[in-house]
Image (cartoon, rainbow, N blue to C red):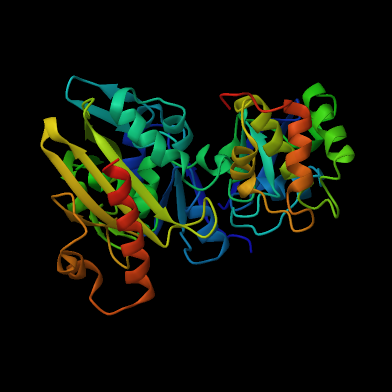
Amino acid sequence: MTQVNIGLRVNGKKVNETIESRQSLADFLRETLLLTGTHLGCEHGVCGACTVWINGAPSRSCITLAASCDDAEVISIEGFKDDPQMEKLRSAFISEHALQCGYCTPGMLITAYDIVHRLPDADDNRLRLELAGNLCRCTGYKGIVCALRRVLGPPSENG
Amino acid sequence: MKAPAFKYYRASSLEDAVTVLADQSVFKKLLAGGQSLCPMMNFRLVRPDLVVDISRLRELHGVEQTNKTVRIGAGVTHAMIEDGIVEGKTGLYLREVAGGIAYRAVRNRGTVGGSLAHADPSADWPSALTAMGARLEVRGPNGSRTVDINKFLEGPFQTSLNDDEVLFAIELPRLTQSARWAYVKACQKPGEFAKAIAVMLVDEKLDLHKTVLGARQSSPACLDEIWDGKEESKIDAFLGSSKSYERTTHFAALRKAIAEVQI
């Protein structure tokens, strides 16, 4: 038996499915639930495009088995639609030109969402360090750092 | 790429996992955080018949501190350590190491025990915990045994863990307030696997003096002293004396560590 039953919450909705045990969470979201906002780049945990929220923290959905997400609370980029903090980040990304092709953007926004909650005092160097796990080949990161700065406000003296 | 097909079993307890591992007829891999195993399966570098998920075993998630030791469950994540689950000076050392592992999204799932059992020479915990003289508790069908980290790490991706055993906990000495260290990684990009790792750890009160050289083509090398940068022959024993890129990178990391630890 290479199949397994899972029950989890995705974007607030209870989901029960029988899946191939080898299926990644990213493929489960995209192909089973048709939530194609989660993007796949490298499929080995380096590019960050597939980053989603699992049990209150960002994780790589390409190197997380859907099978191991039984009982988990998963939020993909679609699930942040009505989140006020994510709305601030989205509009800052638009204002600061923090995307061009947009491929990295869903993962980038989820990482940014983690940064504003976990590191509200981060200076620009720290922001760049934290963003190193999400590859963007268009912007050179300048716009993304500016967008985060816009949401976080000026760096604090102790930042 | 996508992982090849395998059977999946979620262990209900450590005992359950050990029972499942006892069947020697199939090739099994333990899944903790999966942050190395899943990429390797995606690349099809590893093709297990059965994946045994131990990521949710509470027995593996505890941290216990006594006057002299800290015991960390093998399933504790890098992010938990980064956020300070271990107290005191030992905690500060571990936080510095944990915070530099890959990226936050990886640290949220990757575990300290998984990293040791995977034994990638370029990973952080093998070098960082060799410097602390960690002792590893392993559980198997015959109960529990404890093994020194330098006996556990046998080579690249090779450990003395038997097929029917699970790494259970990591025991470390509690560093005193006088402890100093330098943990230096040579990376072209933050979060990538290190080209070289140099660790220097001193705790006079514990009579602990270690210089560790990691990210070699073998397990971490350990000197029971703080190398002063003078006698290169001591290091040549680990790296060879030819002027290779590897040797140059390691020496650069070592010299940076010497400067940092003496500040």
The residue at the point 19 percent across, 54 percent down is: B228
Give x and y (percent) for residue B214.
31, 57
Residue B164, can we see it? no
Q: Is residue A58 above or below residue B102?
A: above
Q: Which of B145 and A140 is in front in this view?
A: A140
Give x and y (percent) for residue A7.
65, 32
- Which image quarter: residue B186? bottom left
The residue at the point 31 percent across, 57 percent down is: B255
Residue A59, can we see it? yes
Give x and y (percent) for residue A91.
87, 33
Give x and y (percent) for residue A89.
80, 32
Left or right: residue A103 compared with residue B248: right
Callout count? 0
Query: Which quadrant holds the N terminus of chain B?
Result: bottom right
Q: Hey, which residue is sitting farthest top in the picture?
A: B67
Q: Which of B197 and B68 is in front in this view?
A: B197
Query: Which quadrant holds the C terminus of chain B?
Result: top left
Q: Is residue B84 above or below residue B40?
A: above
The residue at the point 26 percent across, 22 percent down is: B65
Q: Which of A62 and B224 is in front in this view?
A: B224
Left or right: residue A58 compared with residue B259: right
